[in-house]
Image: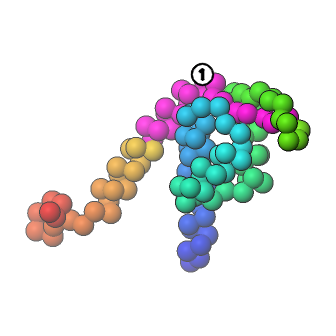
Amino acid sequence: MDIQNTQSQMRKGVLEFCILSVIRQGEVYPSDIVEQMKSANLNILEGTLYPLLTRLKNAGLLSYRWVESSSGPPRKYFQMTDKGLAFYEELKTTWNELADAVQALTQPKNQNNGTDQP
């Protein structure tokens, strides 16, 4: 079994949630998303990000506006829609439930009575 493939699949599974978490904090330019993800040690390429942003926009979860730039072409800034905020809250609940379940399964158990060790 290829550990790198498994790790990649795990990252892909949480990528959408992480991107929405960044956008939920406020209007954002895609390169800012890349930088925030990198600072959290979750690297993402713009070639991966842009199709995902388009899919989320087409689903009605994001909207965007164009902002003129003094250093080049206009920039597209993304923000969450009300539908996106509701979707994010559902994902957050699911993530918390999943993280709690994984934590419970990966914690060492006391062999005598099944309780957590101190």
Magenta residues: mostly which secondary structure? helix
Q: Amino acid at mark 1?
A: Asp
| Residue 13 in view of the camera | no
Using the image as rendered, state which of residue 26 and residue 99 is in the foreground: 26
* Local secondary structure at mark 1: helix
Q: Where is residue 83? Give x, y as percent.
A: 61, 24
| Residue 118 in view of the camera | yes
User: Is disc 1 surrounded by few (<14), some (14 to 19) or many (20+) residues within 10 Å?
Assistant: few
Q: Where is residue 87? Give x, y as percent.
A: 56, 31
Q: As displayed, is residue 113 above or below residue 29?
A: below
Residue 48 left/right relative to 2: right
On whether residue 22 falls in the magenta region, the answer is: no
Q: Where is residue 33? Give x, y as percent.
A: 65, 46
Q: Going 56% across and 44% down the picture, which residue do you hit?
A: 17
Using the image as rendered, state which of residue 40 and residue 104 is in the foreground: 40
Q: Going 34% across and 49% down the picture, which residue do you hit?
A: 100
Q: Where is residue 67? Give x, y as percent.
A: 80, 30
Q: Residue furthest bottom?
A: 1
Task: Please name the residue that numbered disc 1 is placed on.
Answer: 82
Which quarter of the rendering shows the N terminus?
A: bottom right
Using the image as rendered, state which of residue 78 and residue 52 is in the foreground: 78
Q: Residue furthest front?
A: 70
Q: Residue furthest right?
A: 73
Residue 7 left/right relative to 51: left
Residue 39 left/right relative to 66: left
Give the magenta range.
74-94
Using the image as rendered, state which of residue 26 and residue 47 is in the foreground: 26
Which quarter of the rendering shows the C terminus?
A: bottom left
Q: Going 56% across and 68% down the picture, which residue do you hit?
A: 6
